[in-house]
Amino acid sequence: MIAAASGTAPIYDRLITERGDVIADVQRVAEQTRREAADVLDFGALDLDADDDGE
């Protein structure tokens, strides 16, 4: 992933060009992990009345 050059820090822009934007990659992976964890831990999706016989 290559970010747009900001023009304010040429050495940083060069590192992003050479190595990729590690910060943006980490943010993307963190958001993906957060969504996956939310899906797995979504207890609201459980149907607790499925085994209930109405009593």
Image: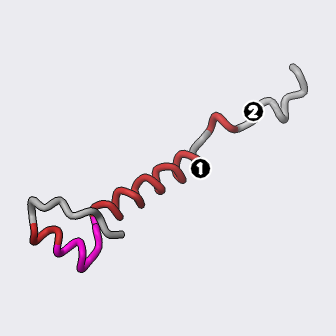
Residue hosting label 2 = 48
Side of 4 relative to 50 (left or right)? left
The numbered mark at residue 13 is none
Residue hosting label 1 = 40
Residue ID at (83%, 34%): 50
Q: Position of residue 24 (x, y in %)?
A: 32, 60
> Residue 51 sits in which quadrant?
top right
Q: Is residue 15 magenta?
A: yes
Q: Position of residue 33 (x, y in %)?
A: 47, 56
33 or 19: nearer the viewer: 19
Question: Can you say which quadrant of the picture contains the C terminus?
Answer: top right
At label 2, which amino acid type do we have?
Leu
Q: Position of residue 53 (x, y in %)?
A: 90, 27
Near mark 2 (Cα within 10 A), the count class, few <14, some 14-19 or many ≥20, is few
Q: Which of marks 2 and 1 precedes in the sequence?
A: 1
Q: Report the span colored magenta.
A: 14-22
At label 1, which amino acid type do we have?
Val
Instruction: Check contact, mark 1 vs mark 2: CB within 8 A.
Output: no
- Label 1: which secondary element: helix
